[in-house]
Image (cartoon, rainbow, N blue to C red):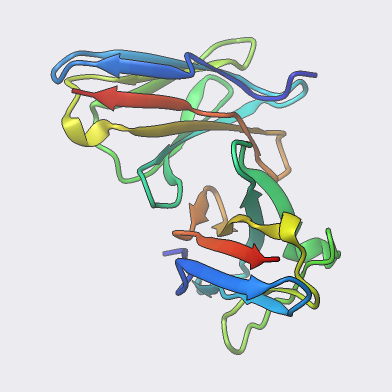
Amino acid sequence: DAGVTQSPTHLIKTRGQQVTLRCSPKSGHDTVSWYQQALGQGPQFIFQYYEEEERQRGNFPDRFSGHQFPNYSSELNVNALLLGDSALYLCASSATGWTEAFFGQGTRLTVV
Amino acid sequence: AQRVTQPEKLLSVFKGAPVELKCNYSYSGSPELFWYVQYSRQRLQLLLRHISRESIKGFTADLNKGETSFHLKKPFAQEEDSAMYYCANTGNQFYFGTGTSLTVIP
């Protein structure tokens, strides 16, 4: 089991562009959560997907959207990128009924 | 709202000395608290959860509801303990603290 995998590992985008980040959960996990980790900060919860629906959402604008596919993999989309969106984006997966989350290595997004 | 506070951003101790990383939470219900660790160039990983009351790598953490704390402790720090430590509180989502960077000095 490769665990939680995220792609790409690094990404540079221009302000105003759109970006899509991808996450494959750990085998046997059906719940995917996304986090934004700015430099020097702890991870901030963006949203969680379960059964292909957004189940919970943190304090992030609608520019941040997501999707979960039938195979439980997930995408995070960010529109109209701002310089402040530059951060490490973490994906975490968990199994229904368990609160332990397994994290991916993250995608480092730089907006210039 | 569920929040966790880690008052120390940086903590340095000598090898063999006791270490305590502080975490305070604010949650009116029954909290589920975790400690996550991130070693250099590795992904965030679970270290401890309060419900299991276990000791991992010599670390323990006790939930103190009176003080709303979940401090992480180890009696004798090792160099390999140097890492970033995050306290987290979860209900329907994880709330992470800002983290404490622990450096164990040889």
Question: Relative to A72, does residue B7 appear above or below in the rendering?
Answer: below
Q: In the visual, does A89 lie left or right of B15?
A: left
The quadrant of the picture occupied by the C terminus of chain B is bottom right
Q: Quadrant of residue B52?
A: bottom right
Viewer-closest of A95 and A44: A44
Extreme-bottom residue of the structure: B66
User: For the image shown, how many numbered marks are present on the structure?
Assistant: 0
Residue B38: image location, x then y, percent: 61, 47
The quadrant of the picture occupied by the N terminus of chain B is bottom left
Residue B55: image location, x then y, percent: 85, 65
For residue B71, say whether it is visible. Answer: no
Q: Quadrant of residue A103?
A: top right
Extreme-left residue of the structure: A16
Say which residue appears at 73% left-offset and 42% top-offset: A97
Viewer-closest of A66 and B62: B62
Viewer-closest of A31 and A101: A101
Residue A83: image location, x then y, percent: 18, 31
Say which residue appears at 17% left-offset and 29% top-offset: A82
Say which residue appears at 13% left-offset and 18% top-offset: A16
Extreme-front residue of the structure: B106
Residue A107: image location, x then y, percent: 46, 24
